[in-house]
Image: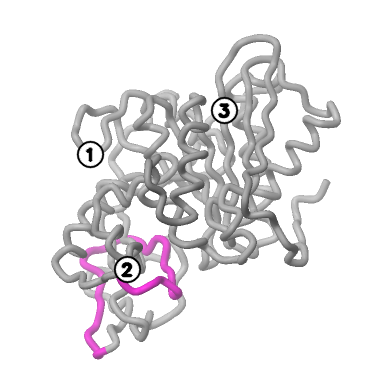
Amino acid sequence: MSDVFKQPAVQAYPTSQLRIHRFAALTSGPRLIVLGAVHGNEVAGSRGIERVVAELDSGALQLVRGSVTFVPVTNPLAYHKVQRNGDRNLNRNLRPTDSPQDYEDRIANVLCPLLDGHDVLLDLHSFQAPSQAFAMLGPQDNQGALEPFAQARQEQALAMRLGVNRVVEGWLATYAQGVQQRLARTSAQDRAGLLSTDPSYGVGTTEYMRSQGGYAITLECGQHDDPLAPGVAYRAIRNTLAHLGLVDALAPPPCQNLELLRLMQVVDRHHVDDAFVRTWSSFDPVRAGQMVALRHDGTPVVASTDGYIVFPNAKATPGNEWFYLAQPSARDLGAT
């Protein structure tokens, strides 16, 4: 089957339910969950999941131990709208609540208990600007207050076997620093705007999974409309199943030429007329002092240090992340 994918015509999608596929082997083993379309316009993961589910349904692929759960469309409202969010960003401020106030709160009340019942999460995403696929890694083992963790070795091993040669770390710590800057200037009155000033707003699917004792990887499969991105998602799922021993397949070797970067700064968009000075792609290099963008009043936004642009989003909502800066990481992934 070709890895090239043609985007289907937009179709109506039910928004009052989650479609969940679960396969359980007769022999115990790890419990994996795979998510697609946490953001509704990021469908590479959905297509990759559908391909693997079809193989499991037909018997072409068989689970021999453990279990795997697939949620091909995790945010049905956003998927139906063909946009990033339904009412707000599902991948921020993810936690169960007794008083849901929006669609994503109601999804969280189903999704969080589902994540609780698993050991490992693979969350499949895509991004706006053209660039290569990459994985997002959690923190090193620590007992700190922000994101305590004790399974870095297992998470690193999985990240190195997804089929991509670039890994980025440092998400939640960098986001928390950005929240402090946002608090100093925000005057937002809408709930989404107020949530973005809460440090826990940086908690998404992977951060929640780690907080519940599991480990998790976000895989950015490529640009939203890249026809190769669903193939990246498919190969990552197959590699994960083999690496965890859920299927009888040759375990994938670790990537030997891995590039590891660490996020170190987030810059928010303040106004709808804030604009980049050029079309940026993730991992474009920048030099300290280089102009990246202009504020609506003409104030230049320059790179604070040598590094790389990550997640540039020309359509970012004012008050939220516009782009990140990253630098090479000194983290030792070890013999994983």
Q: Residues within 10 Å of mark 1 (few under 14, many from 20)?
A: few
Cα–Cα span, label 1 and label 3: 25 Å
Magenta residues, dominant SS class: loop
The residue type indicated by label 3 comes to: Leu
SS label for mark 1:
loop
Q: Earlier in the sequence, mark 1 or mark 2?
A: 1
Residues rendered magenta in the picture: 297-319
Q: 272 above or below 14?
A: below
Residue 256 lies in the magenta-colored region: no
- Check the image and tell me how it is coloured: one colour
Q: Amino acid at mark 2?
A: Asp
Report the side of 273 relative to 80 (left or right): left
Query: Taking 249 as reference, is 82 left or right?
Result: left
Callout 3: 10 Å neighbours few (<14), some, many (20+)?
many
In the rendered image, which residue does mark 3 sit on?
Answer: 32
Residue 250 picture location, percent across and down: 68, 22
Mark closest to the chain's N terminus, 3 or 2: 3
Q: x%, y% of residue 40?
A: 58, 58
Q: Residue at x 44, y 58 (%)?
A: 89
Q: Residue at x 32, y 76 (%)?
A: 292
Residue 113 in the image: state x and y as whole percent.
48, 32
Q: Helix, strand or loop at disc 3?
A: strand
Q: Residue at x 78, y 30 (%)?
A: 56
Q: Amino acid at mark 1?
A: Leu
